[in-house]
Amino acid sequence: MTVHSPRNRLEPGPFAGRLVAAMVAAVLVVPTGARAADAPARASSFAEEVEPVLEQYCYGCHGLGVKKGGVTLDEFADEDAARRDTKLWLAVLKNLRSGIMPPAGKPQPSAEDRRLLETWIKYGAFGIDPNDPDPGRVTVRRLNRVEYRNTIRDLLGVDYDTTNEFPPDDSGHGFDNIGDVLTLSPLLLEKYLAAASAIVSKAVPTVSKVVPERVVPGSSFRPSDGKGKAGALSYYEPATLSATAEVPHDGTYRLILDVTANERYVDGQSDSNKARLLFRADGEEVARREFVRQDGKPFRFESDRDWNAGPHTLEVEVEPLTPGEKQVRSLSFRIQGVTVRGPSDEKYWSRPTHYERYFPGEVPEGLAGRRLYARELLGKFAAKAFRRPVDDATKDRLAALAEAGWSADGLTFEAGVARAMTAVLTSPRFLFREEGVDPISSERFPFVDEYSLASRLSYFLWSTMPDDELIRLAGEHRLRAGLDAQVRRMLADPRSSEFFRHFVGQWLQSRDIETVLINGPAVAARDAAPDPEADRRRARFRALISKAPEELTAAEKKELQEIRSGFGRFFRRFREFELSRELRIAMRRETEMLVEHVVRNDRNLLELLDCDYTFLNERLAKHYGIDGVVGDEMRRVDLPKGSPRGGVLTQGTILAVTSNPDRTSPVKRGLFLLDNILGSPPAPPPPNIPALEESARKKGGKLPTMREAMALHRKQPMCASCHSRMDPLGLALENFNALGKWRETEQAGPIDASGTLITGEDFRDIRDVKRVLIERHRREFYRCLTEKLLTYALGRGLESYDVEAVDVIVGRIEAADGRASALIAGIIESAPFQRRRRASTQAEAPGPAAVGASESPRKGADHD
């Protein structure tokens, strides 16, 4: 096993060089399934060529009076009626491509027959014109919480906590940036109004001069003897920390000490210790206060001092007041800093922080000059906030709003401008992503204008507004021509980490690891061998506590105490199985870093399914049972030969978020693979399906293995069809418990992870499954990943008219030997990303079937 240095972080890698080749290759790729020129001819050949294929391979189950699954393919009134049922043909296409239909063991269509059927569905039933592809509908997209926060940060330099201030965003098609679900409720509108005021008041100065201030950071406060931590003091030991404040002029200064009183929680135990905090300036006491445990509360102490120019000593001292008390909570103080504000004499006042950022010139004295200056400032600010140039009427309205503030309301010029900036942040043109089309284009599906393209790029790869370079190139009409260089630059920028965090976090559900409920001790106990003695102790404990305390004999009281002590030791021993916050973060980062490594280094996308390395720190490596990793830093680690790890399927994130709190869930795991890896989720479960535990009771007195419980559950007819697809995939992961740890047995006996996929391939364990996926089902994986990424990039669910765009991208990936650059380039160069319908075209377009159209529950209780 090789452990790479923690300093060897992810670099941009060779993605850049291959991206150009991937984009150039677009003109060489033939749409999957047929040449574009063949499409019109194939669209009219249903009766002669397509129906015989259906009759030979499909009508046995879905025709001639047989309607398995409620599906029939031979009862259309005419060919036009057949073409109109796009939802049916989309299901046929997905099942045909995934190998589900015809079922394994039944006669299979030849490659030519499959091509004929696929071609008719795409160009006949769906009506796709590959020479003029429909880019799809556009729902105007509101900024979600992440995009709003990042946009405000880049626009005004304020980190506004949208997680706490705004309600959660709804999700659709697996993502929270979908335009159809990003509605604007009255509550959210009120939140936006309040946020705009708070953000502008924090960022934009409203006066031209302020009392100067400087901050002595808490880290500058150090013990005189060099022992102890800078800026930190314990309740339990007497200590003094000091720092120096330098002031430039004689005068009156205000000193502001900010400190927090902290504690570390320890098993519910109380700590009654007290301490006195003293604050001194040049040896003179400024403030004092006595503290008990304060649960992390902030405190502020202020005092005015007359100081001469030069250095001054600041001291913070702690005096323990209860040295005899038990010390169990680690009570402490943290010095945040001391603000020195002054001198108060107005002749020393200075420009506020960031004043020049918003008011780069002197404010004119006359009204006409102020109006022009306000118009100039607000025009530039609005253009940046709206992500495109603004017209003169908008500039005039904003300037008038600013003037109303500084004149009618008696505010300063700066305050009037700030008021107008608040209006900009509440405008729909800021809160929603306004898009337009190329004004000179006469095409039915024109390109989006370059400002819209800039926003599509930046919110796709950065989750934030376009930067100055993107806007400049858009204004010069050179962005579309220089896309390859811009994509390289954007992926090399640190802001691209947002793409990996939010796309990967939702596609692979890795961000759910931070909140998923897993009962570690219960999971560990389920994996342990049966312990009759432990069962006896539990039964005896229940018997003893059922008695009133006064009824217990001395021997029984002693026995009860011993049992309780044993339980305490048991739970302390199993504490190592808990998913701590640090472990959860490491798991999430492992998943993100693997995808980031593959994309940045333009590696084969199949490494996401299986590879001989992963990303670990010491805590996560110990959890996985991998030796030789030391330290908290996440780094690439080569896996031992034969390790079942490698690829996202066996990472702790996926294994935990697809489990129940106290056990694994083959159903959730199988469903996850079908939905997020193979792109063929089953239909939602019917109502009133009994829980797995209810089926398991039918086994009798012996606790069944998970495989036995699933087999019992599958005997119910309404469960069998879907479970035959999900269960083999989920059971292949049974060697990993709900915590993501490898195991050979569970309580009822050895684990059998073998099985047969619905497409007919046998496997022994997850290693074989990964091999089968790569060798036999790589195209389904490429297509699924393309659909997920295109959905995220477009902010809408895919429809039947998007099948051609997905097929073209998949063809590019295959032609590039699976390289990640082909996927990214394919998304950005695709018609849905580059073009849009005109308003009239959008109104006339039919309502097609959704691609991957299953909004079935992903995280609910097992319906096994």
Image (cartoon, rainbow, N blue to C red):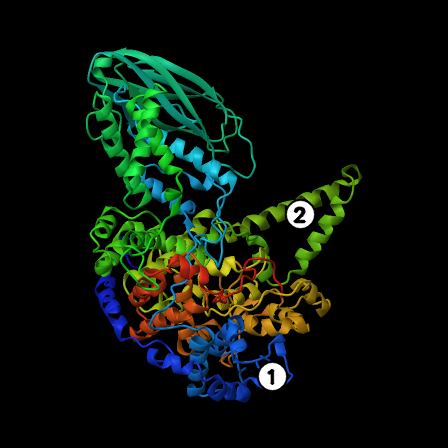
First in residue order: circle 1 vs circle 2:
1
Question: Which residue carries the number 2 mark?
Answer: 563
Q: Is residue 625 left or right of residue 155?
A: right
In the figure, 111 relative to 87: above or below? below
Q: Position of residue 385 (x, y in %)?
A: 32, 41
Q: Secondary structure at mark 2?
A: helix
Please say if the residues under marks 1 and 2 sit with CB atoms less than 8 Å apart.
no
Residue in the image at 52% along x and 80% along y: 79
Residue 240 or 198: which is nearer the viewer? 198
Amino acid bearing label 1: Gly
In the figure, 864 relative to 163: above or below? below
In the figure, 376 relative to 83: above or below? above
Q: Secondary structure at mark 1?
A: loop
- Which is closer to the viewer, label 1 or label 2? 1
Residue in the image at 47% along x and 68% along y: 679
Amino acid bearing label 2: Ile
The label number, if any, that marks residue 63 in the structure image: 1
